Image (cartoon, grey):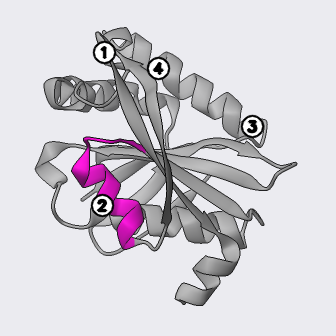
Amino acid sequence: MFHHRIDGRVELRQLAAGDAVELFDLTDANRARLRQWMPWLDGTKSAADTAAFIQSALRQHEAGQGFTSGILVDGVIGGVIGYHEISRANRRTSLGYWLAAAHEGHGIVTRACRALVQHAFTELDLNRIEIRCAGGNVRSCAVPERLGFRREGLLREAEWLYDHFVDHVVFGLVRSEWSALG
């Protein structure tokens, strides 16, 4: 089970079945804001839906293909971060994240991403990490930029978001660049 303390207030902890109600309540409280960028909100209508998501994430972890962690602020779930899928053959993964509005603007996601990047390169022996952000999501795009990811391209109309397509900006980082960033 993954657990990483970032500082005195923030830690990452792999989601567990018992987190379903708390995570659903956080999702529901941030629904309108998250719906601007996340395509899965309409399919998350109850704690049971969140429980199914957590079970899927736990199966993914058991198969060695990634994991999903809660971002805990003062012991309470304030967001989610994780590896979407790990390709062992290609030694790569991608990161995804979201944070409740109440916790934005404090560098929490940047520090959480830094921890998972370090973990991917040192513990999982991966070589490449991608972060894809909706082109208009300026706050999300700033995270990989702060961490030294390179903007590698734009995928036009890459995701259907309820009633329209959104472009994705693709950011990438390879282990040799991370090591050079020190």
Residue kind at label 2, given as amino acid type: Ala
Residue linked to disc 2:
142
Q: Which mark is residue 53?
A: none
Magenta stretch bounds: 133-146
Question: Element type at marker 4?
Answer: helix
- The residues tagged by marks 3 and 2 sit, at their Cα atoms, a distance apart of 32 Å
Q: Residue at x 49, y 67 (%)?
A: 149
Disc 3, SS: helix
- Report the magenta stretch's main SS: helix
The earlier-in-sequence mark between 3 and 4 is 4
The answer to which of 162 and 106 lies nearer the viewer is 162
Q: Are marks 3 and 2 in contact (CB under 8 Å)?
A: no
What's the distance in space between the residues labelled 2 and 4, CA to CA?
30 Å
How far apart, in angstroms, are the residues tagged by discs 4 and 1?
28 Å
How many angstroms separate mark 1 from mark 3 (CA)? 35 Å
At which x and y percent is residue 66? 66, 43
> Which tag, 2 or 4, sits closer to the chain's start?
4
Q: Which residue, given by chain and number where applicable, does mark 4 sit on?
A: 51
The reply, left or right, for residue 32 in relation to residue 145 is left
Residue 24 percent across, percent down from the top left = 30, 24
Tell me if residue 25 comes above or below residue 16 in the rendering: above
Say which residue label 1 marks: 164
Q: Name the amino acid, label 1.
A: His
In x, y percent, where is residue 96?
A: 46, 44
